[in-house]
Image (cartoon, grey):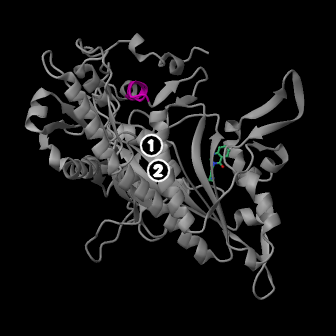
Amino acid sequence: MATKDAKKSNPSAKRGGKKEVKKETGLGLSYKKDENFGEWYSEVVVSGEMIEYYDISGCYILRPWTMSIWETMQTFFDGEIKKMKIKNCYFPLFVSPGVLEREKDHIEGFAPEVAWVTKSGESTLEVPIAIRPTSETVMYPYYSKWIRGHRDLPLKLNQWCNVVRWEFSNPTPFIRSREFLWQEGHTAFATKVEADTEVLEILELYRRIYEEYLAIPVVKGKKSELEKFAGGLYTTSVEAFIPNTGRGVQGATSHCLGQNFAKMFEINFENEKGEKAMVWQNSWAYSTRTLGVMVMVHGDDKGLVLPPKVASIQVVVIPVPYKDADTQAILDACSKTVNTLSEVGLRVEADLRDNYSPGWKYSHWEMKGVPLRIEIGPKDLANNQVRVVRRDNSAKVDIPVDKLVEQINDMLADIQQNLFDVAKQKRDACVKVVKTWDDFVEALGQKKLILAPWCDEEEVEKDVKARTKGEMGAAKTLCSPFDQPELPPGTSLTCIWIFSLLSAIITTTVHVAPHTGWLGEERCLVISKKTN
Ligand code: 87F
C-alpha cells in the first residue's frame, strides 16, 4: 500500500518547503524543527539511522542505533526491578478468543485495535487467534492457577516483549506504531498497601529513565477518571511535553488494578486467618515511545542529539590529515585516544574511513547525535592536544592529552546535565497556571501546558473536550501532579469548567454560586492539546 507513511522512506524525494542541502557534504536535513515539525521528525529518525520505514504502514525497523539506546534503558530498569524481587518471564504472543473475551468490559473500547491470525497457509483456522495488545488476559488465568495461599504472594512478574495494536490514526515512528517493544509488569499482593507502594516505586523508576537517562523532565501524577485505564482502580503516569507541538505525551504508566481482574479471573488465596481473599494487582509499562520523546525533545536542525548516558557512541574520533602531514602519526594518535578512553569504560570509536572527508564525517556524526567529537590534526599532534566539539551547543575546546580522560568525563556529565536543564527551561516556559475558563482557552491556543483547578468528574472532562474541539485542538488532561502549586493559605480552588458555564449563564444575568466543594476536591491538573 503506497501510504503517506511509506513515502517517507525516502524523505529526500520530496523537497517541498526544504532548506538548502549542504553542498560540501550532501548531508543535512530538508526540514527545520521549528518550521515543519512533523516532516523534520520523520526525516531525523531515518537520517540519524534510528528507523527505517517498512512496507507495512505503522511498522518500522529499529536499527542498531535505536536498539543500543533501548538496551541501556533496559539494563537499568531490569536491574532495578530485580532488586525489587520482580522476576522475568515470557508468555506467548497469541491469545485465544475465549480468554480475550473474559475481559470483555475493558477490551470493548480497544477491540478494533486487536489484530487476528485467521489463516495458516491456505487453510482458514477453525478458531482465529488474537495477537497480544497487552497481556492481562494471557497471564491472569495462570495467576489464578499459581496463587493458592498467602505464601504464594506476592507474585511479581515482568516480561520484555513486543505487542501489536492495529492503530488507525496517523502512525508516527516510536510514538504511535502498530508493533512496539515494551516491558509489562504484572504483580499480585495480599494487601492494597503493598500494591500502592509498588505503584509509586515503579513510577519513580520511570521518572529516572526520563530524567536521568533521557534528560527529559516529566510530571509525575495521577490520571483523571476519564483517562485512567478503565480496567483498573487508578492510574499514575509520567508526562512529558513537546514544546513544538504544545502536546503532552504519556511517558509511562503504573496502574493499581485493585481487585477488578482478581474478580474476573478468580485470583483468590487463603489468607493467614484461613479465609478466602482476593489479590490486589498492579500493572505497569514503558515502551519504545521513550525514544520518540527523546528525539522530539533534544533533536535540532542538524539531526539527533543523544544524551551521553544512552548514546551508543559517546565520543567519535576523527582524523584531520593535511596534505604534507604525517597521516600515519595522526591515525595512530586517533587509535591511542580511542584506547585511552575505552579503557575507562567510555563508548568511543574512531572514524578512520579514507573515502570520506573530515567535513562529511562531522555532519554524519552530528546527524547521528554523538555527544562529543574529537578532531586530531597536525597542529593538535604538535601541541600534544586534541580538539573537542560538543554536539549540544557546538562549543569547541582544545584539551591536553594528559587531561583527556578527566576532561572528557566532565564534558559528558556537563552535556547530560545541560540537555536536561535546557529541556526543563523550555518546558517550564510553556507552563501556564490558569484559574478561569477564558484564560484556559487562551493558553490552549498558545500551545501551553496548562495547570488548572479541576474537579475530576468524567462528565466535566467530556464537556471540556467537546467545548475545545476545533481549531484550538481538543484539550486532554494529562495528570494531577503529585507536586501541586503552592496556594496562599485559605485559597479555595474552583474548577475552571464552571467558568465556562458561568460565562454562558452570565450573559442571561442569572446568578450562580461559586463552584466549590460539591463536585469533590479540586486539585490542579496539567492539561494540553490532545495527542491526535
Ligand atoms: C489495545 C487493545 C486491546 C491498551 C489496548 O498500560 C487492549 C488494550 O488493555 C488495553 N490498549 N490497553 C490498556 C493496557 C493496560 C496495561 N497493560 C499492562 C498497561 C500497562 C501494562
Residue 217 image position (x, y, % from top left) = 34, 53
Q: Residue at x 39, y 32 (%)?
A: 471
Local crowd size for mark 2, using a 10 Å CA cut-off: few (<14), some (14–19), many (≥20): many
Mark 1 within 8 Å of ligand 1, using the beta carbon: no
Residue 143 image position (x, y, % from top left) = 76, 63
Mark 2 within 8 Å of ligand 1, using the beta carbon: no
Residue at the extreme bottom of the image, as rendered: 273
Q: Residue at x 88, y 31 (%)?
A: 125
Quarter of image, res 36: top left
Q: Magenta segment: does it hold 404? A: no
- Determine which of the numbered discs, if any, sits on residue 503 in the image: none
Residue at the extreme right of the image, as rendered: 126
Whole-angstrom CA distance, mark 1 to mark 2, is: 7 Å
- Using residue 98 as the reference point, say whether residue 5 is left or right of it: left
* Foreground pick, 109 / 66: 66
Circles 1 and 2 in contact, beta carbons < 8 Å: yes
Image: magenta residue range: 41-49
- Determine which of the numbered discs, if any, sits on residue 73 in the image: 2
Q: Amino acid at mark 2?
A: Met
- Check disc 1 and report its element: helix, strand or loop: helix
Q: Residue at x 74, y 55 (%)?
A: 139
- Using residue 307 as the reference point, say whether residue 531 is left or right of it: right
Q: Residue at x 48, y 29 (%)?
A: 51
Local crowd size for mark 1, using a 10 Å CA cut-off: few (<14), some (14–19), many (≥20): many
